[in-house]
Amino acid sequence: MSVQTVKRASLLKMPRPNVFLRKLFPYALIAPAMAFLIVFTVYPCINLVYLGFTDWNLVRPVKRFVGWQNYQTLFKRPDFAQALRNTAVYTVAMVVLLIVGSLLLAMWLKDNKKLNFVAQAAIFTPHIISLVSVSMVWQWLMEPKVGVLNTILRFLGLTPLQWLESSKTALMSVIIVSFWKSIGYYTLVVLSALQNIPAEIYEAAELDSASKWRTFYKITFPMISPQLFFLLIIITINSFKVFDTINIMTNGGPAGSTNVLAYYIYQYAFSYMKIGYASAAGTILLLILSVLTVLYFRVFSNRVHYQ
Amino acid sequence: MAKIEFRNVNKSFGQVRVIENLNLTIEDGKFTVLVGPSGCGKTTLLRMIAGIGPQTSGQVLIDGVDVTDVPPGKRGVAMVFQNYAIYPTMSVRENIEFGLKNMKVPKPERDKLIKEICDIVGLTEYLDRKPGTLSGGQRQRVALARAMVKKPKVFLMDEPLSNLDAKLRAAMRVELIELHERLKTTFVYVTHDQVEAMSMADTIVLMNEGVIQQEGTPEEIYSDPNNIFTAQFIGTPPMNVLELGRGGVKFGFRPERAQISRESSGRYYERLGRISTREMLGSETIYKVVTSDGPVMVKGYDSSFQTGDEVYVSVDKQGLYLFDSEGFRIRAGAPDYGALMELLGRTAV
């Protein structure tokens, strides 16, 4: 008897698992991951929506059901409208600035020159520094009387700004810091996409007498569109959820001018102890992000070229 | 239609000099194949003609005009890249049309040209497909169509068949020859495959380490090699080259010009040896025979010999080549040609 027949015989003697167990097996394999997901993602989401319909205050054990009352209050309050507006301005500014900025920087850095390695490192550095220390530095830079930025503005003969101290410029100041902090990471994403485009394609375009602009518009841009689409979604979500920068630099002020949705929710939940009200606001944030993401996929998916 | 000239061309990549002081004329309307091992500078030459990898110094002339400062798109050349370099985000039609659009060719004319070319290469039904959905052979055709549609004076091809399977490669070889027959334009074709070079070329330019080894028709290159490199690069198996045993002189003969026999044949060169390996290829059989001069390859139609047989390897006088110690050919008429040949014939079996 050869080795193979021996093996086959012993296999035949093995008890066959019954059909039910065999069907269950794959589910058993993914069960740990699913359990994790249900406990830490699905349940909190459902609970968030549920809490939005109660007036729980974190202290009382009773969660009284109040129906749509929290939502009615939300839409009546001007501070919520202001937070929504600030969030929208912040998000649009970040999406536009970061995508255009990272694209321009990546185009500049894509050739393998020594200077580019240095520049790349310099641009990426803010990403790895703690936001807390960075915020201190920026607060000092933006100090209206003796800060470096105003000193430069005065030197150039321009009107100095109030930066974080005025409700007119505070949001812009925060946007500048956030942009500076995250541009390096997004540039790196675009850069790797650009460097993955084969050189021959550009050479073929040169032989096809394509102008620089047409080469960018017809070849480079479509070829990095998957990465740009990814950035669009990630930046939108991150901007809608912005919290730490606001918390450290402005606490939502002055006069609520930098109050954004995430900070608003935090304030009501943990400073004013209105968990129900905060949950309703959180549900709205969840809704906006879901709608935006679906919308993005609907609008842009035809224009994104996956290979 | 265009003649291409290289005049004292040099090319360096950083500190590395790839091509030094090269002069070459590629004739108008001919199918010229640049062939050589990897890194010999053949693609570098092609890219100089295209203008996508300009020479470090020297001149490249197309139809007598120095094109050093002419951008690639304005040189009247079209190129087929090794991995096709098709624009992956454009449809087949857009790929073919891209160059025409850039040159502001009006739409009716573009449509006419695309239809005409696609009928020739057989792409008509794939025009609206994305390259990702095409097979290797079809992508190859897109690359060809994209080059043809511009009606260039010169076709440049950089190993265009190397990514195809053997069968398709053979078929495309014939198609390219037919295409050249029809268009009658200058074709410059780069390959490392000597079979492709031999089968397609009007003129072969054989290169090694940035230096042209020999230029000529396939027949010349095969039957009248200038040096050992040419003799061994062309032909499968390569020419047998052995020591003559005087002043570093070597002699050689092609495996297919040698014969093996059990009895002495009385040919000019004859050695007794033993068969060490036997490769049966179908119609032909290749034997490796160890003789007193060294191991030699013999190719023939007789497959009756077996490994271990003692046989005579013999070659006619016309099938023998002599090379000096530098590897250069010693042709008939050279001062010591007669004496060396005599040595070869006389040496004992």
Image (spheres, coloured by chain):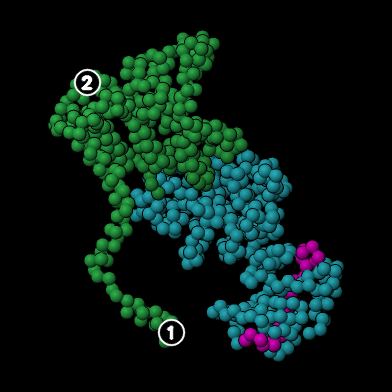
Chain colours: A green, B cyan
Q: Residues within 10 Å of mark 2 (few under 14, many from 20)?
A: few
Residue A77 sits in quarter: top left
Type of residue at label 1?
A: Ser
- Note whether residue B209 is visible: yes
In-front residue for pair B25/B229: B229
Q: Is residue B332 depicted above or below A143 in this figure?
A: below
Circle nearer the N terminus (1, 2) = 1
Give x and y (percent) for residue A30: 31, 55
Q: Is residue B99 depicted above or below A125 in this figure?
A: below
The circle on residue A77 is 2
Residue at image point 38% right, 25% down: A247
Give x and y (percent) for residue A256: 32, 18
**How far separated are the C-alphas under marks 1 and 2?**
84 Å
B31 left or right, relative to B135: right
Label 1 resides on the chain identified as A
A105 left or right, relative to B3: left
In-front residue for pair A72/A84: A72
Report the quarter where the C terminus of chain B lies.
Answer: bottom right
Type of residue at label 2?
A: Arg
Please tell me whether residue B315 belongs to the stretch shown in magenta.
yes
Q: Is residue B304 depicted above or below B182 in this figure?
A: below
Q: Secondary structure at mark 2?
A: loop
Give x and y (percent) for residue A189: 46, 39
Q: Is residue A284 depicted above or below B64 in this figure?
A: above
In-front residue for pair B262/A147: A147
Label 2 resides on the chain identified as A
The circle on residue A2 is 1
Residue at image point 69% right, 86% down: B311
- Note whether residue B114 is visible: no
B275 left or right, relative to A195: right
Q: Which residues are magenta?
A: B305-333
Q: Secondary structure at mark 1?
A: loop
